[in-house]
Amino acid sequence: MHALIYLPSHGPSEHQMLSRAARQSIALHTLGPYWHSPPPSSPQAIIVGYGTPAGHAYQPALSALTRLLAQASPAGRT
């Protein structure tokens, strides 16, 4: 199963989020490539798989994702 984290319409695009994630060695997938026929103003989102990672990997992965998302929020942008 997966969860979607929708990006704010005034925030970074999926492409920008992928670039930011890659610079931080975070692997992400975005919603865009999965649209068969996207509506004109289709929502942008990142896809988060929530299968259980190895115990030692869970907290670092969650922390990295949290930092990335904080950078995308209006309050987190500099």
Image (cartoon, rainbow, N blue to C red):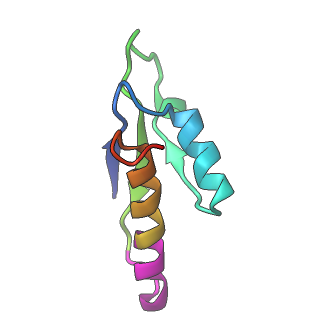
Residue located farthest toward the top when viewing the structure as drawn = 40
Specify the quadrant that holds the N terminus.
Answer: bottom left
Q: Residue at x 44, y 61 (%)?
A: 67
Above or below residue 4? Residue 15 is: above
Magenta stretch holds residue 60: yes
Magenta stretch holds residue 58: yes
Range shown magenta: 52-62
Expressed as whole percent of the image width and height from the top left, the position of residue 63 reads: 42, 71
Above or below residue 48? Residue 72 is: above
Residue located farthest toward the front when viewing the structure as drawn = 78
Depth order, front residue of 27/36: 27
Query: On the picture, is 56 further left or further right than 43?
Result: right
Above or below residue 11? Residue 53 is: below
Q: Residue at x 59, y 58 (%)?
A: 27
Q: Residue at x 47, y 55 (%)?
A: 68
Q: How many labels were placed on the picture?
A: 0
Task: Locate residue 40: give its quadrant.
Answer: top left
Depth order, front residue of 49/65: 65
Query: On the picture, is 37 further left or further right than 8?
Result: right
Q: Residue at x 47, y 78 (%)?
A: 60
Expressed as whole percent of the image width and height from the top left, the position of residue 5 reads: 33, 46
Expressed as whole percent of the image width and height from the top left, the position of residue 78 reads: 48, 43
Main SS category, magenta section? helix
Query: On the picture, is 75 further left or further right than 60?
Result: left
